Image (cartoon, grey):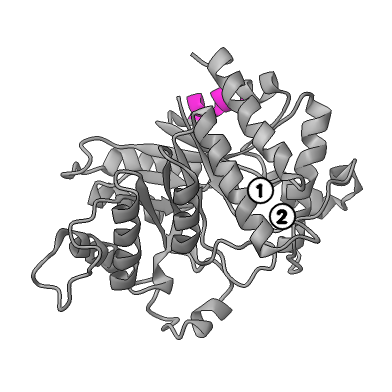
Amino acid sequence: MKLSVLDLVPVIEGGTVGRALADAAALAQCAETAGYHRYWVAEHHGMTGIVGGATAVVLAHIGQATRTIRIGSGGIMLPNHNPLVIAEQFGTLDALFPGRIDLGLGRAPGADQRIVRALHKDVNRSADDFPNDVVELQAQFAGDPRLPMQANPGLGARPELWILGSSLFGAQLAAMLGLPYAFASHFAPDHLDAALALYREKFQPSPGLDAPYVMAAINVMAADSDDEAVLLASSMDQSFVRLRSGTPGQLPPPVAGYRDSLPAPARAMLDHMRQVSAIGSPRTVAERIDAFRQRTRADELIVSGATFDPAMRRRSLQLTMAAVRAVVA
């Protein structure tokens, strides 16, 4: 089973952007050594606790720190950008790190609607234009002569394109274009099964992919015991609750018994969002990952998570990979 890593590049309370970027490079190196297949960074904006907004720049930093692991976006929120600019950015990355670049594309803004105004985008058109923008981006890499301007760098680049989604829309688009599909089940699990079924049913082979290819995201936190893993994951839990409460911030330190301290509505919200999770000892994590793989029949899983102490996230990746290799055939 292929395992990959999704990193939001979190800033811990009291930390700095520079420290977060250094920790991201160390995490990518750890993932590469442990045998993970990809390392993806997600585009978010306007959040003091997440610094992956300049995604291509972060990936250049990660690429310099690693040698073999695939690196990419999970994803670039294409409505925020001009396809020509993304073709230039990822064409540059492909030239720097040939054969290692993934370009995952999402339709969401990566922030609230303020980002649309801040980027001077047309709020009524940007998301609706997503399919056309994906096709234009493909045309930029292919050098379609009908384009008014060719991306350079970009022309002839071969990043691996993905469609990301948390609804049926992305599944339909990925199937229609014959692209691999990644589902954001780590925070939006409601349409997971229906989206994967639709993608597989409607998939049309393309020059780059002759059969459906699915990656599903899962929250993972492994530690020596179930109790320690739950404690470490409480930093993520606090961040989720703060985000949903309209008060996002930097990643806080863990709090023992955090979930039990929440009022019932907040706990229900957290439990619903986090239902696709594997948090516990290595054996607990391996069993839950295997159950999720059997449920989704995914070709690949991508693990998401964050810890206040970055060393504990690296240890979680190591424990997870070792446990999966030992338990999952």
Mark 1 crowdedness (10 Å alpha carbons): few <14, some 14-19, many ≥20: some
Q: Earlier in the sequence, mark 2 or mark 1?
A: 2
In this rendered view, identify the residue nearer to me: 30 or 55. 30
Percent coordinates x, y for residue 127 in the rendering: 40, 71
Percent coordinates x, y for residue 38 in the rendering: 45, 40
In the depicted structure, whether residue 137 falls above or below residue 101: below
Q: Which residue is mark 2?
A: 240
Front label number (2 vs 1): 2
Amino acid bearing label 2: Phe
Q: Give the structural element (helix, strand or loop) at label 2.
A: helix
Amino acid bearing label 1: Met
Percent coordinates x, y for residue 215 in the rendering: 43, 39
In the depicted structure, whether residue 267 falls above or below residue 300: below
As for residue 139 lying within the magenta part, the answer is no
In this rendered view, identify the residue nearer to me: 22 or 206. 22
At x 76%, y 65%, the residue is 245
In this rendered view, identify the residue nearer to me: 219 or 7. 7
In this rendered view, identify the residue nearer to me: 143 or 195. 143
Q: Which disc, if any, is residue 121?
A: none
Q: On the image, which quarter does residue 274 sit in? A: top right
Task: Check if mark 2's residue and mark 1's residue have beta carbons within 8 Å.
Answer: yes
Magenta range is 288-295
Q: Is residue 38 visible?
A: yes
Q: Which disc, if any, is residue 273?
A: 1
At x 52%, y 56%, the residue is 42
At x 87%, y 51%, the residue is 262
